[in-house]
Each structure stands twice: as structure tokens, then as C-alpha cells.
Image (tube, rainbow, N blue to C red):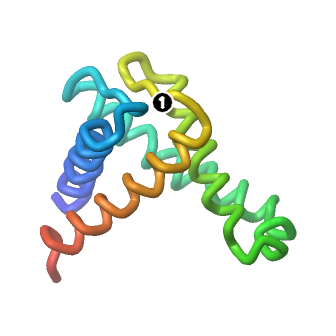
């Protein structure tokens, strides 16, 4: 049940990002649900490998390169799903930061333990 709620929170966060940023577009609720699922899988499976591979660069930039990784993954998901559009790299970086912040805030409010 908790996993389903987290998935819905992430889909709502994607809708909020598309509402706040004109450079990120989501066509409908089905696209938001699919994009939230794919983003969750990408962040679970691919992101740790990329973070590990780019560890020297992340250390040199004091962790700021993680924003680049998150933006690239957000942009890749936006490019691969029909109905989810991200205008460019910097839009993806901004969208991923906003997505993370909104998702964190909604989770903190709705998933009190």
C-alpha cells in the first residue's frame, strides 16, 4: 500500500513540475503515472551505477555533479516516453531538482510514520 502511495505522490509531483515549469510538459494522468514508474525504476537501477562510475568527478565538484546525473536521467526519461516532454538539459536539471523537492515535501506530509 505504501509503495502505491509513493508512486501516486511521484506522479503528482510530476504534474506539479509541469505546471510550474513551462519547459516540462505532461499530457495526461496516464503519462504521469508511467513516467513516475519509469523514473522510479531508473533512479533505483541505473542512478547508483552512474554515481559510482562518476565518483571521482563528484568528489572534485563536491557532489554537484549529482545534479548533472539527475538531470540527464530526467531528460532521458522525458525523451523516451511519449507525452512527457523536457525542453533541454538545463530544463531537465531544474525539473529534477523541483521534482525531488516536491516529492520529498509531499512524502513528508502524507507518509508520516
The quadrant holding residue 17 is top left
- Above or below for 95 versus 85: below
Relative to 112, 45 lies left or right: right
| On-image quarter of the C terminus | bottom left
Q: Which residue is at 33% across, 31% downward? A: 34
Q: Residue drawn 29% across and 50% down?
A: 10
Residue 65 screen position, x and y as percent: 71, 62
**58 over 26 or under it: above or below:** below
Q: Which quadrant is the N terminus positioned in?
A: bottom left
For this view, does 113 lie left or right of residue 91? left
Report the side of 109 relative to 49 (left or right).
Answer: left
Could you tell whether 25 is left or right of 15 in the image? Answer: right
Furthest residue to the bottom? 113
The residue shown at (66%, 53%) is 68
Check disc 1 and report its element: helix, strand or loop: strand
Q: Is 104 drawn above or below residue 95 in the view shown?
A: below
**Where residue 92 sits in the image (x, y, percent)?**
53, 41
Front residue of 1/46: it is 46
Nearer to us in this view, 58 or 37: 58
Q: On the image, numbered disc 1 is attached to which residue?
A: 86
- Image position, residue 18 (x, y; %): 31, 37
Callout count: 1
Q: Nearer the viewer, residue 84 or 90?
A: 90
Question: Is 50 placed above or below 20 here?
Answer: below
Label 1: how many Cα within 10 Å (few below 14, some 14–19, many 20+): many
Residue at (31% x, 67% y) in the render: 104
Point out residue 66 in the picture as x, y percentages from the top left corner.
65, 62
Amino acid at each position: 500500500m505504501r509503495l502505491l502511495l509513493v508512486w501516486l505522490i511521484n506522479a503528482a509531483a510530476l504534474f506539479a513540475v509541469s505546471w510550474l515549469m513551462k519547459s516540462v510538459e505532461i499530457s495526461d494522468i496516464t503519462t504521469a503515472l508511467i513516467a513516475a514508474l519509469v523514473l522510479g525504476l531508473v533512479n533505483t537501477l541505473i542512478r547508483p551505477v552512474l554515481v559510482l562510475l562518476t565518483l571521482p568527478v563528484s568528489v572534485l565538484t563536491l557532489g554537484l555533479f549529482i545534479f548533472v546525473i539527475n538531470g540527464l536521467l530526467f531528460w532521458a526519461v522525458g525523451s523516451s516516453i511519449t507525452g512527457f516532454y523536457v525542453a533541454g538539459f538545463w530544463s531537465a536539471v531544474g525539473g529534477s531538482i523541483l521534482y525531488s523537492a516536491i516529492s520529498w515535501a509531499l512524502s513528508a506530509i502524507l507518509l508520516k510514520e
